[in-house]
C-alpha cells in the first residue's frame, strides 16, 4: 500500500469532502489535502501541490480536484503511484459553462453564497438527497470556508483548463474512475469515456450518489479506494 495519499477537493470544497476517506486511511498512511485556493490556473495548483508532496504518492481528486490531478500527471507523472479520478471530466469547459462560471464569480464577489448554493444544489447531489439539510449545511460551510477570493481563483482555473483527453492513453498506473449514478454535472458516460482511454482503469459507479459521491455515499467510495490503494503497481 502507498505511504502517502494526496487528495484534491472540488470547487468550493475543503478536506471535509473526503472526511470519511481521511478518517479511514489516516491510520494506515500519510494523508494530505492539497491547497487548491491560492492559484488561478491548473498549472499553478499542480505546482503548489507538487511542492508540498513527497517524491512519490498516490493521487485522488474529485471534480475540480480531478482536473488538477490530471495536470499533475501532465507535469510530473513519474511521481504518481496511483491515480483516482472522481466525478470529473477530461474535457475542457464549453462556452456555455464558461458564461455560467462568470455569473457565479459575480455572485461570489458579493458573497451571495445562498444564491450560489440554491442554483447548484439540484445538480450537486442525487435526487434522493435533495432534502438532506445536514449534507446541504456541510456544502454551504465548505463554500464559505473557501471564501470569495479562493472561489473566484478556482473558477478562473477551471474555465482555462486544457483538454486532457490526449493525456489519458499514456497513463500506465493503477487508475480508479468513480462516478455517482445520479451525477448530472459529470455523468456516467463521461466517466466511461475516460475509463476507455486508460488501459489500467477500473470504473466504479456509485449507487445513490450524485456529483459529491465521497460525501453522499462515503462507504462505497472508501471501499473502492481501499481496493485501488491495495492494487499492485504492476
Image (tube, rainbow, N blue to C red):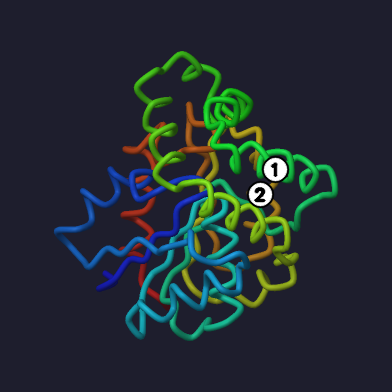
| Image point (26%, 69%), residue name | 1
Disc on res. 189: 1
90, 174: nearer the viewer:
90
Q: Is there CB contact under 8 Å for labels 1 and 2? A: yes
- CA distance for labels 1 and 2: 5 Å
Q: Decide which of 196, 2 is in the foreground and name it.
A: 2
Q: Which mark is residue 192?
A: 2
Q: Quadrant of residue 26?
A: bottom left
Q: Tell me: 108 left or right of 129.
A: right
Front one among 177 and 52: 52
> Along the horizontal axis of the image, is 100 left or right of 38?
right
Does residue 125 sit above or below 83 in this rendering? above
Provide residue 190's location: percent of width, then percent of height.
69, 47
Residue placed most toward the observer, 220 or 125: 125
Q: Residue, x 23% and y 68% (percent of image)?
A: 30
Marks counted in the figure total: 2
- Helix, strand or loop at label 1? It is helix
* Label 2 environment density (alpha carbons within 10 Å; few <14, some 14–19, many ≥20): some
Q: Position of residue 228 (x, y in %)?
A: 38, 59
Amino acid at each position: 500500500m502507498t505511504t502517502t495519499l494526496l487528495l484534491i477537493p472540488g470547487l468550493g470544497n475543503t478536506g471535509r469532502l473526503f472526511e470519511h476517506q481521511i478518517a479511514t486511511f489516516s491510520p494506515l498512511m500519510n494523508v494530505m489535502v492539497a491547497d487548491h485556493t491560492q492559484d488561478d490556473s491548473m498549472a499553478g495548483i499542480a505546482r503548489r501541490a507538487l511542492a508540498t508532496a513527497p517524491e512519490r504518492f498516490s493521487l485522488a481528486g474529485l471534480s475540480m480536484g480531478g482536473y488538477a490531478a490530471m495536470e499533475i500527471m501532465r507535469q510530473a507523472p513519474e511521481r504518481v503511484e496511483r491515480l483516482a479520478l472522481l466525478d470529473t471530466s477530461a474535457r475542457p469547459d464549453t462556452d456555455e459553462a464558461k458564461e455560467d462560471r462568470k455569473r457565479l464569480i459575480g455572485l461570489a464577489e458579493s458573497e451571495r453564497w445562498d444564491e450560489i448554493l440554491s442554483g447548484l444544489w439540484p445538480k450537486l447531489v442525487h435526487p434522493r438527497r435533495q432534502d438532506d439539510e445536514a449534507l446541504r449545511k456541510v456544502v454551504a460551510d465548505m463554500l464559505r470556508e473557501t471564501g470569495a477570493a479562493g472561489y473566484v481563483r478556482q473558477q478562473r482555473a477551471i474555465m482555462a483548463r486544457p483538454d486532457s483527453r490526449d493525456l489519458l492513453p499514456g497513463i500506465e498506473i493503477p487508475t480508479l474512475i468513480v462516478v455517482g449514478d445520479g451525477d448530472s454535472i459529470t455523468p456516467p458516460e463521461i466517466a466511461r469515456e475516460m475509463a476507455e482511454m486508460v488501459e489500467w482503469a477500473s470504473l466504479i459507479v456509485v449507487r445513490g450518489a450524485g456529483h459529491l459521491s465521497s460525501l453522499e455515499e462515503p462507504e462505497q467510495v472508501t471501499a473502492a479506494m481501499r481496493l485501488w490503494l491495495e492494487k499492485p503497481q504492476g
